[in-house]
Structure formats: structure tokens, C-alpha cells
């Protein structure tokens, strides 16, 4: 007998980590146990017949933006804010009742909506709904408020304590790294299960097709250029200055640093800084965010728009020198596409990923000679590169494949069945 599972968040759309990992959970649940997934959020790209879009649940909704302006960055909460929060929470709670009834939901999976307080009324609504209904639920936590500096100074301490995350019977908690597991236990007294982000390593990457075969030409690379891909947004925590310094020390003018995404909503200061650094260090940048989209399509000029998965097969090397990551999906993606990749030793990598034994050039806050020589060998020695990337693929298949997610979800749902018997 099939069960209906309801995924709840502010957004399920595009290529953000929450949307991508949620889709993987739904895929595994359907393949293994015929769980049918339904979707609730403020911005959705799921099929209308299996989803319920409530615009007020989106974190950019004007009412939520008004609330956020008065909660974050100061300690005093003006009169009237709490009533606006509760009014919106009551409305959203009503839509959750409607969602569960419409699709006959038996289990809720809350994706980051009671983790990071981008939408306080939605977090309150979910908490109250779970307390009122006692419906079995799983909270999948990607990044907590205490991991983000913007939430450290707030007039929302009562809401953070109540709902981010809440202590609710029949709610199981899932985190994506060991540090988050320990912090959740220490700060909230809440136990959790660690399920890392995963990829379907049992299914190899698709071959090039007629659409993506011309990527190198379309982004202005010559046939003998060395395509070094930085598959991230241009924001300070991505440490792109380290990628620039790597290419400077490689000293090969054929190496071109291609950055896939733009700065997003975090401003252009860092973009200007890395452009100036690249110019000073004589490193050629290719900024191609105007050719990268969330779906394959043609732009207004009739040019192809590529998805990130179109870029990886063409890359000769991948840089991922992040200073901080909740997990690091780009690292898994590079390994999945069998590309050599340089990594900065960010905390989650050092604690959770590196001990698995991956063969990667690793830096610790600066580009050293050993890393440069290892990168040079991986670029120039095809046989060595194939040996290393094949080894990393097998290791990732073991630790970060769908089998890991499958086993973990089976355990969570077994717990739910035990609780409801």
C-alpha cells in the first residue's frame, strides 16, 4: 500500500541545495517503498497536480520581508510585529491543514523551514500544526540559524527557541554533518540522525549530446585551453581568490578559470575584488553566468543556456576552495563527473569527508607548493588522473550514494511505524 508523504518548505524550485536534496529523498522513497510525494511551498516548480503553492509561504513574500526587517539586526521588537507574525502563522497553519487533507498526507518532511529562520511565521505555523495534529514528521536540517552571522543579533529569541527547531513529539530530526548533530544536541537537547547529501553514483553521468557538445566553443575557449571550472556563485565564502592564486602559480597561460554563477543577492564588491586580483596576477577569467540557467533553454539573443551538468564533462579540473560549507555538493558533483578537484580544508570536509580517504589536492587556507604540483600532475598525466578519479568515484559511491540515503530513510520510516502502532 502506498503512503502519501508531504514535503514542506518555503521553496522547492531551482538548484538550491534544499530543493535538490528533497527531490533525491522523494526519488528514493518512491523507488523503494512506493511513497508518493506531494509538495507545499511558496515557490514551486513541481507539477500542479501534486503540489500546493501558497505565495505567503515564500521567504521573499512582502509580508514576511516586512517582518524580517523588524526582527534581524537589532534587539528591540516594535509593538505589532508579534501580532503580524501570529496572524500570518495562523493563515499558513490553515493551509497546512488543507494540504494534508487534500493529499491524504500520512508523514510530513519539513525541509529547512524549522531550521534557518528565513520565514518565522511559517516556522511557527509548522510547529503549532505538529503539536495540534501529532502527525509523524521528519525535519531535515541543512543550516541552523547559529551558523549564520545575520541571525546573531535579533529581536526573535522567543521564536528561535520555540520553532527553530521545535521540540515536538513524533518529530525526528536529520542533519547533514557531525558538527550540526553535536550543536543541536548541545543547544536544544535534541537528538538527530546524520544523513549526508548524496548523488546517484549507481547511475553514471550521461554522455555528451547535441545540446552540450559545443560548450567550450560557446564560452570562448580554444581547443587547447585548459578548462578550470569554479562551479559556484561569486561570494566571499567560496574562496575564489585561492583558485586565482592556484592558476597564477601553475603559470600556464592555457589555464582559464571559468566561474559558472554570478554573485546573486550578496552584492558586487567581491566580484570586483576577484576581477582585480585576476588582472594583477595575469589570470584569465571567464564569467559565464549569462550562459548558465536552471534549465536548458535559449535566451533572448537565441543563445543556448546551459545547466551546470553541461559544464562538468568539458572541465579539465575543478576548484572548490570554499571557506565554509554546510556540506559541499559541488565536491560530490566533481567526483561524480570523474573530475580532479582541489579543496580547501573547510570544517565539514575536514571532519566528515576527508577521513573517508579521498585522493584530492587539499589546501589549508593558502596555496602551497605540494598542492600546485599535485594539480599540475592531475592536469598533465591522463593515466594518473583516470586512476585518481576512478578511485574517488568508487569511494563516493560507498559513502555518498543512494544506498546510504535508502538505508537511512528506511530506518526513519520504521521509527514512524513503531511510534504509530
Image (spheres, grey):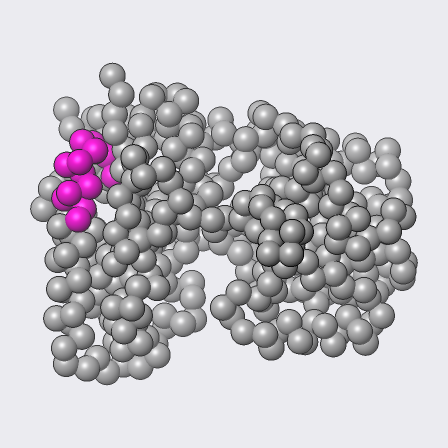
Quadrant location, the N terminus: top left
Q: Who is closer to the viewer here, 84 or 399?
A: 84
Residue 301's x, y, as percent? 64, 56
Residue 95 shows up from this direction:
yes
Residue 257 left/right relative to 92: right
Q: Nearer the viewer, residue 151 or 211?
A: 211
Specify whether residue 275 is painted magenta: no
The image quadrant of residue 21 is: top left
Q: Residue at x 25, y 52 (%)?
A: 54
Furthest residue toward left: 132
- What's the residue at 13%, 64% (across, down)? 87
Task: List the single residue furthest toward the top.
Answer: 1
Q: Residue at x 86, y 37 (%)?
A: 382
In the picture, the quarter occupied by the C terminus is: top left
Q: Is residue 351 visible?
A: no
**Residue 330 percent across, percent down from the top left:** 60, 48
- Residue 107 forms part of the magenta stretch: yes
Residue 388 spot, x, y in % from top left:
76, 36
Is most of the magenta stretch helix, strand or loop? Answer: helix
* Nearer-the-camera pick, 314 or 363: 314
Image position of 50 (left or right of 407): left
The magenta region covers 95-108
Residue lying at the far front of the rendered structure: 301
Counting from the top left corner in percent of width and height, residue 192 is at 33, 44
Q: Does residue 60 lie above or below 52 as drawn?
A: below
Amino acid at each position: 500500500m502506498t503512503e502519501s508523504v508531504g514535503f514542506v518548505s518555503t521553496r522547492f524550485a531551482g538548484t538550491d541545495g534544499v530543493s535538490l536534496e528533497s527531490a533525491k529523498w522523494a526519488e528514493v522513497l518512491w523507488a523503494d517503498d512506493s511513497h508518493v510525494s506531494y509538495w507545499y511551498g511558496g515557490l514551486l516548480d513541481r507539477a500542479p497536480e501534486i503540489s500546493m503553492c501558497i505565495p505567503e509561504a515564500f521567504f521573499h513574500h512582502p509580508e514576511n520581508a516586512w517582518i524580517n526587517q523588524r526582527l534581524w539586526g537589532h534587539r528591540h521588537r516594535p509593538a505589532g510585529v508579534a501580532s503580524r507574525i501570529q496572524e500570518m502563522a495562523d493563515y499558513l497553519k490553515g493551509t497546512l491543514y488543507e494540504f494534508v487533507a487534500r493529499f491524504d498526507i500520512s508523514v510530513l518532511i519539513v525541509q529547512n523551514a524549522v531550521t534557518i529562520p528565513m520565514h518565522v511565521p511559517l516556522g511557527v505555523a509548522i510547529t503549532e500544526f505538529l503539536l495540534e495534529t501529532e502527525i509523524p514528521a521528519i525535519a531535515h536540517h541543512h543550516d541552523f540559524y547559529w551558523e549564520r552571522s545575520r541571525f546573531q543579533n535579533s529581536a526573535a529569541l522567543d521564536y528561535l527557541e520555540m520553532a527553530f527547531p521545535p521540540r515536538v513529539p513524533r518529530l525526528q530530526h536529520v542533519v547533514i554533518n557531525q558538527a550540526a548533530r553535536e550543536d543541536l544536541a548541545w543547544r536544544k537537547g535534541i537528538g538527530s540522525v546524520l544523513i549526508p547529501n548524496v548523488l546517484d553514483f549507481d547511475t553514471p553521468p550521461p554522455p555528451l549530446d547535441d545540446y552540450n557538445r559545443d560548450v567550450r566553443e560557446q564560452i570562448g575557449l580554444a581547443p587547447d585551453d585548459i578548462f578550470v571550472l569554479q562551479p559556484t556563485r561569486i561570494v566571499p565564502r567560496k574562496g575564489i581568490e585561492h583558485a586565482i592564486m592556484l592558476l597564477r602559480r601553475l603559470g600556464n597561460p592555457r589555464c582559464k578559470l571559468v566561474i559558472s554563477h554570478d554573485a546573486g543577492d550578496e552584492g558586487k564588491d567581491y566580484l570586483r575584488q576577484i576581477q582585480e586580483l585576476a588582472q594583477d596576477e595575469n589570470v584569465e577569467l571567464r564569467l559565464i553566468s549569462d550562459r548558465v540557467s536552471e534549465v536548458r533553454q535559449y535566451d533572448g539573443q537565441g543563445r543556448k543556456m546551459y545547466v551546470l551538468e553541461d559544464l562538468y564533462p568539458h572541465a579539465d579540473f575543478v576548484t572548490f576552495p570554499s571557506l565554509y560549507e554546510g556540506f559541499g555538493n559541488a565536491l560530490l558533483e566533481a567526483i561524480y563527473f570523474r573530475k580532479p578537484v582541489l579543496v580547501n580544508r573547510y570544517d565539514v570536509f575536514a571532519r566528515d569527508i576527508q577521513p573517508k580517504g579521498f585522493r584530492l589536492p587539499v589546501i589549508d587556507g593558502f596555496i602551497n607548493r605540494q598542492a600546485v604540483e599535485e594539480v599540475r600532475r592531475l592536469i598533465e598525466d591522463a593515466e594518473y588522473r583516470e586512476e585518481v578519479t576512478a578511485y574517488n568515484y568508487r569511494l563516493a559511491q560507498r559513502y555518498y550514494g543512494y544506498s546510504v540515503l535508502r538505508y537511512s530513510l528506511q530506518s526513519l520510516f520504521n521509527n514512524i511505524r513503531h511510534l504509530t502502532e
